[in-house]
Image (cartoon, grey):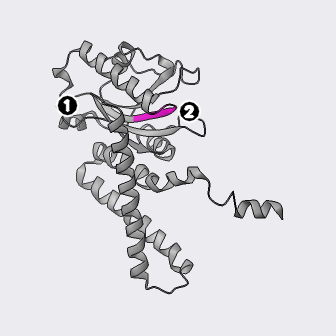
Amino acid sequence: MRLVVRHLTKGLIFRSSLRLVPSLAGTIMPFFWQLINLYGTLPAVIIILGVSQLLIVSMAALLYPVLFFQLRFIQVYGLAALFMAAAVMTWLFMNRSVHQQADFQLVKLQFSTRTALLSLGLLLCHRLTPLPVSPSTTFWDVHLKPSLAGNLRTISRRELGAAVRHDYQQAQASLPNAILFGCSPGSFKHILRAAGLQESQFHIMDTIIPIRHAEIFGLKRPFYFYIISLSPPVSGLEGQSRVPES
């Protein structure tokens, strides 16, 4: 009986469960960008809108009996849509807070989840990657700043390495024990090494995205999926990066 009481008091809602709200948007948005790379903008928009509607309808179906059928289903659907909008706003606020703390030169980070990371690994690389994580680990989708996407050739390798080193250090200071992941055409392996990262701190995998899709960035290079740890170097990822430098 004591265990039941504890579950209904201190164990009813754990503090970390508050992450579930922005996690709704944080899980969906990484798929949007990679579906664009994989299928194109229009299919990605249709798929993400469909998934979003499915989530809202599912939440409404759960809320409908919880509210004892006192509201019409369309009203409950509106409540679920408002909750989804709140999740998106919370997600945007988290992203903005991180960027206010860290003045990134090269990248932008978006709060995400382990579910998104593992699912994208299956979608793009057909594999799961074992990761050393702790209860406090957070996951962030990393992108190049829009103004730099497709324009990295205008930056020297030395400047690029310095910018990566700066952004990595800023991210470590703002997000200790976090994991970054993302997808980009071309291998950044030599740049990550030049920035001072050890191979145990990053992992790079080939993806199934066709090389010709990189033409929208003005490139003709294969796409790679990146996983970068902000934790101190560990042996769990060491020696797993097998992508040739380009």
Residue drawn at 45 percent across, 20 percent down: 242
Q: Residues within 10 Å of mark 1 (few under 14, many from 20)?
A: some
Q: Is residue 50 visible?
A: yes
Residue 224's spot in the image, x, y percent? 36, 30
Q: Which mark is residue 128?
A: none
Q: Which mark is residue 131?
A: 2
Q: Does 110 sit above or below residue 200?
A: below
Q: CA distance from mark 2 to mark 1?
A: 30 Å
Identify residue type, mark 1. Gly
Farthest residue, direction right: 1
**Amino acid at pointer 2:** Leu
Q: Is residue 129 above or below residue 156?
A: below
| Quadrant of residue 193 within the rendered picture | top left
Image vertical order of residue 160 relative to residue 92, above or below: above
Residue 1, x across and y down, in percent:
84, 65
User: Looking at the picture, does residue 89 appear above or below residue 203?
Assistant: below
Q: Which mark is residue 150?
A: 1
Name the foreground residue: 85 vs 150: 85
The residue range painted magenta reads 175-181
